[in-house]
Image: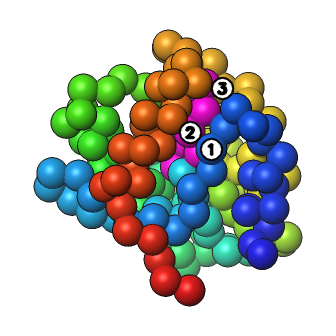
Amino acid sequence: MHNTERELRGLGPEYRVLHGLEVHSGSAAHRIAHIVVGPNGVFHIENKPWSGEIQVGGEAASGSGQEDATAQSYRYEFVLKELLREQHKQADVVGIVCFTHPDARLLGESAAFAALKPDRLVSYIRGYKPKQTLSEQQVQEIVGLIEEHSKSRTK
């Protein structure tokens, strides 16, 4: 089991965690490593196994010789927001880029996405302050909507 999955188990029963879904909206489809839906929103998590110094700043994150770590997160954000909008659901959609390598050193912060190590995922998600809180029923409806518009990765 990946350390991101292990950490996400600590969120508690008010959160639902979905792994490895290809989410479809009207105009796009993207495979998202982890989606968390809870009372404070919908969180999409992209894993990056990069090591060394990773510069996080502005709206991007990059490591030595690496692509922009947030590019994929923008695509995930789009497909989730579009799906919610199409179905007339409102929730904060929050992107997290999780740097899973033990030797990753994050420098700076991003205004667009949270850049975290796995051990900070649970506290970040639980501590996120949404524009509007979701009821347990709304959480279940959004989870159902995402599952209905997804297909699971076959392992």
> Does the segment drawn in magenta span residue 39?
yes
Q: Position of residue 60 (x, y in %)?
A: 48, 52
| Label 2 SS | strand
Question: Which residue has dot 1 on it?
Answer: 16
Q: Residues within 10 Å of mark 3 (few under 14, many from 20)?
A: few
| Label 3 SS | loop
Q: Nearer the viewer, mark 3 or mark 1?
A: 1
Q: Is residue 101 left or right of residue 96?
A: right
Spatial CA span between label 2 and label 1: 5 Å
> Does the segment drawn in magenta span residue 130?
no
Question: Which residue has dot 3 on it?
Answer: 128
Instruction: Using the rendered view, name the quadrant where residue 15 is placed.
Output: top right
Please state which amino acid type lies under the numbered disc 3.
Tyr
Please state which amino acid type lies under the numbered disc 2.
Val
Q: Is residue 110 left or right of residue 24?
A: right
State the residue at coordinates (52%, 68%).
Answer: 20
Question: Which residue has dot 2 on it?
Answer: 37
Spatial CA span between label 3 and label 1: 16 Å
Front-most of residues 36 and 145: 145
Q: Which residues are magenta?
A: 36-44
Q: Position of residue 44 (x, y in %)?
A: 52, 49
Identify the main secondary structure in magenta.
strand
Residue 133 is labelled as none
Front-most of residues 142 and 101: 142
Instruction: Say whether residue 105 is visible.
Output: no
**Callout 2 touching callout 1 (CB < 8 Å):** yes
State the residue at coordinates (14%, 55%).
Answer: 27
| Label 1 SS | strand
Counting residues from the start of the chain, the first of labels 3 and 1 encountered is 1
Please state which amino acid type lies under the numbered disc 1.
Arg
Q: Residues within 10 Å of mark 1 (few under 14, many from 20)?
A: some
